[in-house]
Image (spheres, rainbow, N blue to C red):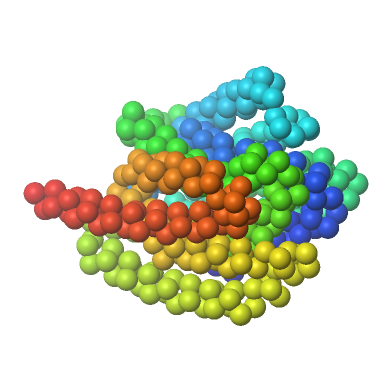
Amino acid sequence: MLSATLFSRFFSFLAAWFALKLIPNKELGIVLFAYNIILFILPVSGLGLHQSLIRYGALLKTNKEKNSLFLYVFKKGLGVSFLLITTIFITTCIIHFQFLETKKYVILLSFIIIPSFLLEIIKAQLRLQHNNKRFAFVEIIQSLILVISVICFSYFLKELGYAIALVLAPMLTSFLFLNKININFKLKETINITNFKFWKYGFFASLSNVASQLLFVIDILLIGYLLANTEMVTNYRYISLIPFSMLFLPRVFMATDFVAFTEKIFDKKYIYNYIKSYMLLFTVISIFMVGLSYFFGNKIITLLDVNFTNYTDTFLILMVGVTGVFIFRGLFGNLLSSIGKAHINYYIATIALLLNVVSNYFLIPELGIKGAAITSAFLMWFTGILSCIWFLNLYKTLLQKQLK
């Protein structure tokens, strides 16, 4: 899975690089501005039922039960996603955007919601089946389709083609793999866990992801709003591309291990050994990454564009911030979800979001995109340490209740 994710991230990076070379910065900035609005909403697709599927599915014993749960999530999630797209369409027609063409791209990119939801539940089902090989294959195929689509459509249709490519990649991938997960769609057996608690977990997990996603997206939105410069939107998007792309490392570990440690969540020795091993590994990786960025940051960002060398400090600040996710948040955020406390992640992300908006309103006008980077770096560490403290306290209480 690690090699597949590396491959996937490399091709996603290539797709972004080709878009930068084929589309003028100003026009690309408008699409990126609209895309970040959709990225903010995307975790709510299916009302977070894909989150409930992976957590509650890991606690089920038989494949038949897991398949029944998948069908329930599939049907309900598609309905919710369709309503979400309709809501976006109506709302977008009412709102006045700062940049021309934003409305068109928000509506077009909203169609990414349904195929993205389908992909999430397909990957969740593969993880429940412990079919990591096919899970990795899904990641590879999606990234290949993305880079080919971006090159072809951006070359002929420029920014419109780029938006089409972003929608097309998850759509084609979900169609290719929906029939590869061995689900009998005629199965009508119901299970008793699809109650209010099941929906509540998914809802708060999705809100947590919305708030967490907005921690990254809000920088783009506020840069666009406060500086009123689409080129600065593009600059920040690409300066942050490499640091934020590195976040795949904790995600791939969680994608591989989430089902396993959820199944063993009451095994105190196993969980604490996992925490120690994970934190040691990612501390070493973090030191290496920051050192590399400090000494070779200039050369690294010239891979994107030589004009970005003016923002080497911004790049380094973001790399330091990402290590907070590496060491703390990636691990303890998922551990909170594994014990059924996804709402805690939402509380943490909401607190961070409020701090983000307030801080950026002061720092972006004063320091430009470096101010946005400082805010993001601080909050990545803040949310990571807070999730660690919260998990350790809740886990101790959970184990005491289990003993009783």
Q: Is residue 182 left or right of residue 264?
A: right
Q: To which quarter of the image does residue 385 belong?
A: bottom left
Position in image of residue 226 (x %, y %)? 64, 41
Name which residue lies at 74% across and 70% down: 302
Considering depth in this image, is 48 or 96 the residue closer to the camera?
A: 96
Position in image of residue 316 (x %, y %)? 58, 68
Name which residue lies at 57% across and 30% down: 81
Q: Compared with residue 243, is residue 296 higher up or lower down, i.e. above or below? A: below
Q: Residue furthest left?
A: 404
Considering depth in this image, is 7 or 181 the residue closer to the camera?
A: 7
Position in image of residue 74 (x %, y %)? 52, 34
Q: Is residue 397 left or right of residue 173?
A: left
Name which residue lies at 78% across and 33% down: 101
- Whether residue 117 is visible here, answered yes or no, is no
Position in image of residue 38 (x %, y %)? 62, 38
Considering depth in this image, is 246 or 2 the residue closer to the camera?
A: 246
Name which residue lies at 61% across and 63% down: 314
